[in-house]
């Protein structure tokens, strides 16, 4: 049996499965995959008193560890990816910010290579097709209406690695661009938008399926002008991104989203920038200068929030301990739902036989004690 992959049984932990929590459960790892049964000579690792949850899936992330996915070299991007892996994110989509079309196309080509190598799960274009009045941390003179031909140029430049494009769908060309993305199997996300309720419904009908960081960079809820938030929350076809860092959202708004959309329609994201897992200081988000102070990133000019310094382990812990959400709901929002949206649920997003052995070991206080990706420990629970 010399050709058989090494098998290890992770035992004794509370294991979160799609069917619920199994106390004193076990996960069998054979090579890079989760196995359905153990061999007689399998090693055993006792993780009693811990949780085992699926590896986190971040579908909206601009960088970390001091590295930018928007402007860094391939080596720098990989450094940022490693930082997030150490915090439990075993699957990550690299997000860009607004830039010139040719610049974004070159960036897409670099990120496509890393996608083909299995280091990242694809590319998310956030901008330039967004509304200037909701630009957030995007350079206004580089913004443009979503011309379907230009949208097509970017997704072609990604060589099949384009996963999502954030659009202000109310702008000229917005609905046609949504239809184009849907035809090419790329997620059309409504974000950085000044859309009305009715316009947002039109975008959903055209094929938009994600709300980019719901509540942020869009009109608020109003009783006579419900705006995009109400339309995005109420439609079963839409998954809403939430940044649960204590800065971007009031806890009541997080609770509203989970209550109204349901855990099956929430994706917890970081929207992280370079400073995630790195520290305070001065950084750049695309061409804009950002100051990070006490873990909060803001533009030097204007003071707009400029992404986050969040890692998904912090979002997980906050969701359970501060917001008092059920662990199963948080696992759904942080692993299963984004994996399904990205078309990767047959490989990642839950602890099921045949899938990659991507998992996170948490202690009783929900702090990370171990991270495994494809059967290899990124962070060993043995210290």
Image (cartoon, helix red, strand yellow):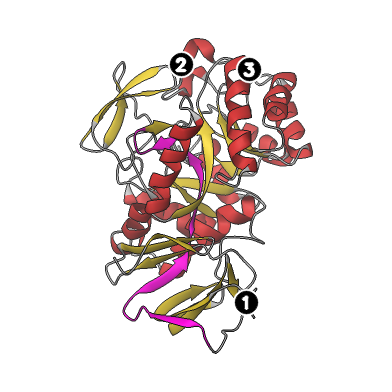
Left or right: where 307 falls relative to 5 = left
Q: Residue at x 46, y 16 (%)?
A: 139
- Find residue 363 and report its horizontal and vertical position in percent: 30, 70
Q: Which mark is residue 210?
A: none
Choose the circle earlier in sequence order: 1 or 3.
1
Considering only order in the chain, which callout, 1 or 2, is on the residue closer to the N terminus?
A: 1
Of 108 and 182, the residue lying toward us: 108
Q: Label 1's element?
A: loop
Among all residues in the image, which is located at the extreme right? 183
> Which residues are the magenta region?
41-66
For mark 2, what is the residue? 139
Q: Quadrant where the C terminus lies?
A: bottom left
Is there a contact, CB below 8 Å, between mark 1 and mark 3? no
The reply to whether the magenta stretch includes residue 45 is yes
The mark closer to the camera, 1 or 3, is 1
Is 57 situated above or below 66? below
Residue 6 sits above or below residue 181 on the image: below
Q: Residues within 10 Å of mark 1 (few under 14, many from 20)?
A: few
Q: For mark 3, does the 10 Å Cα neighbourhood hold few (<14), some (14 to 19), or many (20 or more) residues?
A: many
Image quadrant containing the N terminus:
bottom right
Residue located at (38% from left, 64% from top): 325
Q: Is residue 339 left or right of residue 182?
A: left
The overriding secondary structure of the stretch rendered in magenta is strand
Q: Which residue is mark 1?
A: 2
**Residue identified by numbered label 3:** 145
Percent position (x, y) of residue 202? 69, 35
Quick one: SS at disc 3? Answer: loop
Residue 149 rendering spot, x and y as whole percentages: 75, 20
Q: Is residue 219 left or right of residue 109?
A: left
Q: Position of residue 93 (x, y in %)?
A: 54, 42
């Amino acid at each position: 049996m010399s050709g058989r992959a090494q098998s290890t049984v992770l035992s004794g932990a509370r294991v979160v499965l799609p069917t619920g929590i199994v106390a004193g459960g076990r996960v069998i790892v054979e090579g890079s995959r989760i196995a359905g049964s153990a061999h007689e000579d399998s090693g055993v690792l006792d993780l009693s008193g811990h949780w085992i949850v699926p590896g986190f899936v971040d579908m909206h992330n601009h960088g970390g560890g001091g590295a930018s996915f928007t402007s860094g070299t391939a080596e720098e991007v990989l450094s940022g990816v490693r930082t997030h892996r150490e915090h439990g994110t075993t699957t990550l989509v690299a997000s860009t910010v607004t830039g010139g079309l040719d610049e974004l196309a070159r960036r897409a080509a670099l990120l496509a290579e890393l996608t083909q190598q299995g280091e990242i799960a694809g590319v998310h274009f956030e901008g330039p097709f967004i509304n200037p009045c909701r630009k957030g941390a995007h350079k206004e003179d580089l913004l443009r209406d979503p011309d379907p031909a230009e949208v097509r140029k970017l997704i072609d430049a990604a060589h099949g690695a384009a996963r999502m494009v954030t659009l202000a769908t109310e702008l000229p060309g917005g609905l046609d661009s949504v239809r184009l993305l849907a035809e090419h199997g790329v997620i059309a996300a409504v974000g950085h938008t000044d859309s009305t309720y009715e316009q947002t419904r039109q975008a959903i009908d055209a094929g938009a399926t994600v709300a980019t960081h719901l509540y942020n960079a869009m009109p608020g809820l109003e009783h006579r002008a419900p705006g995009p938030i109400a339309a995005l929350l109420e439609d079963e076809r839409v998954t809403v991104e939430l940044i649960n860092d204590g800065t971007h959202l009031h806890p009541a708004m997080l609770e509203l989203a989970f209550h109204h959309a349901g855990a099956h329609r929430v994706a917890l994201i970081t929207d992280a920038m370079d400073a995630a897992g790195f520290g305070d200081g001065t950084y750049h988000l695309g061409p804009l200068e950002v100051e990070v102070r006490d873990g909060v990133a803001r533009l030097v000019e204007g003071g707009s929030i400029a992404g986050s310094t969040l890692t998904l382990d912090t979002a997980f812990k906050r969701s359970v301990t501060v917001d008092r959400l059920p662990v199963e709901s948080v696992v759904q929002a942080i692993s299963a739902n984004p994996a399904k949206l990205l078309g990767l649920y047959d490989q990642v997003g839950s602890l099921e036989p045949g899938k990659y052995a991507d998992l996170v070991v948490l202690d009783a206080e929900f702090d990370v004690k171990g991270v495994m990706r494809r059967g290899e420990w990124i962070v060993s629970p043995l210290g």
